[in-house]
Amino acid sequence: MTLEDSLRSLSLDYLNLLINGQAFSDVTFSVEGRGQVSIVPQKHEPRPNCGERSCWHTHCTSAVDLALETLAAARSFGVEQLALLTQKQLASMVEKASIEDVMKVLIASRKQDMHQLWTTCSHLVAKSGLPPEVLAKHVPIDVVAKIEELRLKSSLAHRSLLPHHHGHGHHHHHDLSAATEDQKIRRMRRALDSSDVELVKLMVMGEGLNLDEALALHYAVENCSREVVKALLELGAADVNYPAGPAGKTPLHVAAEMVSPDMVAVLLDHHADPNVRTTDGISPLDVLRTLTSDFLFKGAVPGLAHIEPNKLRLCLELVQSAALVISREEGGGGGSSRWWNHDLSATDDIG
């Protein structure tokens, strides 16, 4: 028996079950105008995924799940009229359904190329107010991008209806773009704060977030754990030597000023340059040498009493070692292995 014969046989068996197996059927067919089409369970019929005893099953999870199952079966076996009726029923259901069920229908409509149902659901999700970082955990990143695009268009349309002076449209668009970028940066920082580097990756891929312009590494070095910084570096989307602001400080400058061996080590492991200079000509090595000098000749540095001498010494040794390796490489002396790579997971106990 060929595959086509098998499918034809299975289709006939399925149709026979729907027509004659009333004890197992949730679907009523309308034939030549007789009977009423219903793809929702009856009120008295218990459903395992519906917790409301008095539910009419018009837009609950139980009804949505059954409609989606019916739609998939109708599309698989070529019962197009049933598929169209089910789509219409779903379009009515989602207007009152929970946002979780709307997203479920959204994904199904996308997979099965049901444009009208997709449009209905995507607009409902866009209006829901769910932040993109939450949406990204439930729907693909390209769907999140479409939802954000709808929200942006909606915001622009709303602004166009507001009274404004002639010639200010460009400023409104510029302000909106700036506000959107600020929102991205705030979301990125919240993700880093919760160690959700995967979400940051999704923002880079789906929303075009520029990690350098957002100063993601600088923020992570200053506010997050070594593991978060390492994971961010391993994305390969950030320049470890990116100069921030007018001063031109790199993440390694920040780590040196913090006197954090953990951060210094992970940055050096990912090719941070110990000799890169700020606009004032200061390198990370200069920062650590100055701090060390202040400790040796002045005692504790005012305002930096929290600095532990052992951590300062370790930071200086790491950066000096990195600078020495680079100078040997440039001088043709070999030694290309990064032998300052240390396991510093326990450095918080030093000192």
Image (spheres, rainbow, N blue to C red):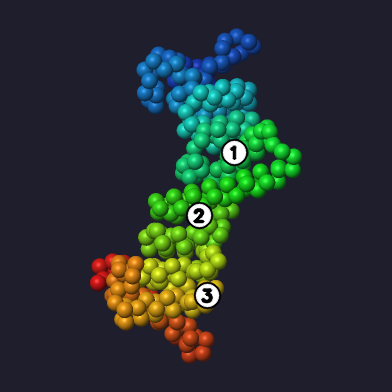
Of residue 157 and residue 287, the one placed in the foreground of this image is 287
Horizontal arrangement in the rendering, residue 301 relative to residue 229 (left or right): left
Q: Nearer the viewer, mark 3 or mark 2?
A: 3
- The numbered mark, 1 or 2, whose residue comes first in the sequence reads 1
Tell me the crowding category of disc 3: few under 14, some 14 to 19, or many 20 or more residues within 10 angstroms, Cα based.
few
- Image-based side of 108 in relation to 318, left or right: right
- Considering depth in this image, is 277 or 194 the residue closer to the camera? 277
Query: In front here: 261 or 253?
Result: 253
Name the residue located 51 percent from the left edge and 35 percent from the top edge: 129
Task: Tell which circle, 3 or 1, labels the residue nearer the N-terminal end.
Answer: 1
Spatial distance from mark 1 to mark 2, Cα to Cα? Answer: 21 Å
Give the residue furthest to the right. 166
Instruction: Report which residue position mark 2 lands on.
Output: 201
Residue 22 percent coordinates (x, y): 47, 16
Check disc 1 and report the residue beneath it.
Answer: 151
Helix, strand or loop at mark 1 = helix
Mark 1 closeness class: few <14, some 14–19, many ≥20 residues within 10 Å: some
Query: Residue 57: image x %, image y %?
Result: 46, 19
- Distance CA(mark 3)–CA(mark 1): 44 Å
Q: Is residue 251 left or right of residue 343?
A: right
Quarter holding the N terminus is top right
Q: How many labels does the image show?
A: 3
Q: What type is the residue that disc 3 sits on?
A: Asp
Q: Residue at x 51, y 90 (%)?
A: 331
Q: Residue furthest top?
A: 34
Residue 333 x/y as whole percent? 48, 90
Q: In which quarter of the image is the C terminus?
A: bottom left
Task: Return the disc, 3 or 2, that comes first in the chain's sequence.
Answer: 2
Residue under label 3, please give it: 280
Place of residue 142 in the rendered image (x, y in percent of width and height, measured from the top left): 57, 45
Compute the Cα span from label 3 to label 2.
33 Å
Are the two marked residues, 1 and 2, in contact with CB atoms closer than 8 angstroms?
A: no
